[in-house]
Amino acid sequence: MIRRFRFGNPIETDSIPEKPPVTEEALPYFDVTEDGTELRLPLGASRVYGLGEQVRGINKRGWTYTSNNSDQPHHTETQHSLYASHNFLLADGLDTEEGRLPVRFGVYFDYPGAVTYDIGYTDTDQMRISFPDANYDAYIIDGEGDLDIISQFRALIGRSYIPPKWAFGFGQCRWSYMSEDEVRGVADGYQKNGIPLDMIYLDIDYMKDYKDFTVNEETFPDFASFVQEMKKRHIHLVPIIDAGVRIEKGYKTYEEGVADNYFCKDEDGKDFVAAVWPGKVHFPDFLNSGARRWFGDSYRFLLDQGIEGFWNDMNEPAIFYSEKNLKRFFEKIESYKGKNLDIQSFFEMTGLAAGLANNEEDYRSFYHDMDGIRVRHDRVHNLFGYNMTRAAGEAFERNVPEKRILMFSRSSFIGSHRYGGIWMGDNTSWWSHMKLELAMLANLNMTGYLYTGADIGGFGGDTTPDLVLRWLALGIFTPLMRNHSAMGTRYQEAYRFGHLDDYRNILRLRYALIPYIYSEYMKAATENAMYAKPLAFMYPDDARAAEIEDELIIGNEILIAPVMEQNKTGRFVYLPEDMRLFRFRSADDFDTEDLAKGDHYVKCAVNEVLIFVRKGHMVPLAKPADSVDQIDWNDLTWIGYPDGKETVYELYNDDGETKDYDPAGHITRIVKRGSDL
Ligand code: MIG
């Protein structure tokens, strides 16, 4: 049951396609301050899930988080905000003694500005949720259990984005592959070594002077035929699109945006000027439907050249500096000149430079035209990236309605999950960031983002061969599987490190698993279910399972427990039920071991992958292929753990390109007897 409560006069976010009517009842469960800006809830012994892309664990208790989309490359425990705002929480195991709390409930706050979730931070026993102003809709979701609450919420926010089937392949990225030849080199590195690959990503340097919807003709002289050349090799090129439009006379996108008033304005009504990669830019006003239509249609420049997928970046929006702020900066810096700087003023001075980027004052100095309503950016800050993705998604729907286009974004807000996926932004080559990915997978699935994954191997910093290998072993289960690294860091493509067999084997296992991954994804998307689930949700009566933060249930049949520490040859695993362990060295070389419910220490060498199959369940395996379109779905083998009865699996398959997702036409019920497995 979902109830909608209204406070004040909220700004429309369009995060919910069809809203239930507002109820006149008072908001249950929470104590609400008189002005409505703060809600309090006694936490008892409960666990709190949700918030999608955020720091820390699956259970969010014990920290304070703020929904404030930020270009934040330091994903450390003590941050409060990353690139996204996903204002959904699920509290489970509440103290019902007072008689007013249910055991669990879900809540979604539809509010486009900064919300702070103090979840047992100020007061260990209490959650405090605060808003800058009391204009929001709160949706309270009551249900049978965690999974039921989640699927009610997911039905409320609308079906999750479904990418083309080839986007379930493996992709390689780097900031940046600078030329056609460098891209060819990457394709060769994979294909000559027999390592499967479906995508090579183009980062900002494919463009001319970082201008959206342009291609650098010196380094990519015949882009359209290069796209075809790669396609013949079964590789899709996926270019990046940045939020800022370079100010340059004669540049089409700039001229059009100025002429039609499609850019965000400053206080004086002039086009707001910020600086990002292209130098000085204007920001398209994605909150305006005309600007959205115009910007979305601009992707045609690349679609027309054979491109079928994109990633949207810098759309928090990231601002390196604004003209006004830079002016203030120089004035202030000038004032230090010739002075005898004491330590305090010295740090003040260095702080000034650090404070130029993504400055809150800049976010307060430009305006949107929300189809006739002028709104200052900071009040709707978290909607910007969402609406950039929506601009593209709506345009694809208009311009290529028959076809799925790959789209994912860095910044997001609930609602954008209908138009694209997200990647988890600029992580670092740290083992702890594998753990962070695992936790985020669970929380992002709750909030509608099924097509997601982190930069495998780590984006910032130098990676190591074993980190890449172990990270791939987690990444083979993420729908979005991409290796990406930053400029200046060690190259980390899967063919760079010696022990090539290990990387080949692990990626071939991914491709063998694609019938499973795709089936489970499509079922999750069409049924508003979770693809990656915390154990707590599947085993609600198991107190141990409730605290497991380094294992996940993937789809409905398997549990994964990746090794996420360096120099380990195994790990402890908690199994919430009897399972059969498949220890894969390659897709067709594995041994098995039956393990009872409970705790185990399992060996897992650096080149092995563990898959735990639930009793009474089975999983299809394809013959490894070099790309998704070469997988033979008619030639599947099955691994499973029969329980004496028949084992059943619902296999979903479709053409992977068009948009008929009706499960009835695409699901085959496969039945095996024990002796067949
Ligand atoms: O300021 O385009 O998160 O994936 O490689 C950095 C360059 C801009 C940030 C993205 C990252 C991308 C990088 N971008």
Image (cartoon, rainbow, N blue to C red):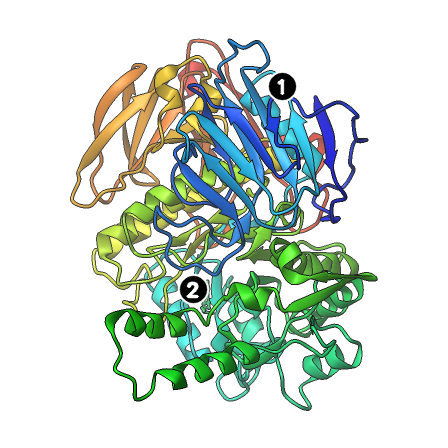
Q: Quadrant of residue 1?
A: top right
Q: Check disc 2 and report its element: helix, strand or loop.
A: loop
Q: Identify the residue at image location x=53%, y=63%.
A: 360
In the image, is residue 667 above or below residue 431? above
Front position in the image: 511 or 344: 344
Where ligand 1 lies, by image quadrant? bottom left
Q: Identify the residue at image location x=70%, y=50%.
A: 658
Front position in the image: 415 or 418: 415
- In-image side of 549 versus 272 (left or right): left
Query: Which residue in the protein does label 1 denote?
Result: 143
- Is the residue marked by circle 2 packed among few (<14), some (14-19), or many (20+) residues within 10 Å? many
Q: What mark, if any, has residue 173 been given in the picture?
A: 2
Between the residue at mark 2 and the residue at mark 1, the CA separation in whole angstroms equals 42 Å
Mark nearer the N terminus (2 vs 1): 1
Work out whether residue 577 can be spotted: no
- Identify the amino acid type marked 2: Cys
Cβ of mark 2 under 8 Å from ligand 1: the answer is yes
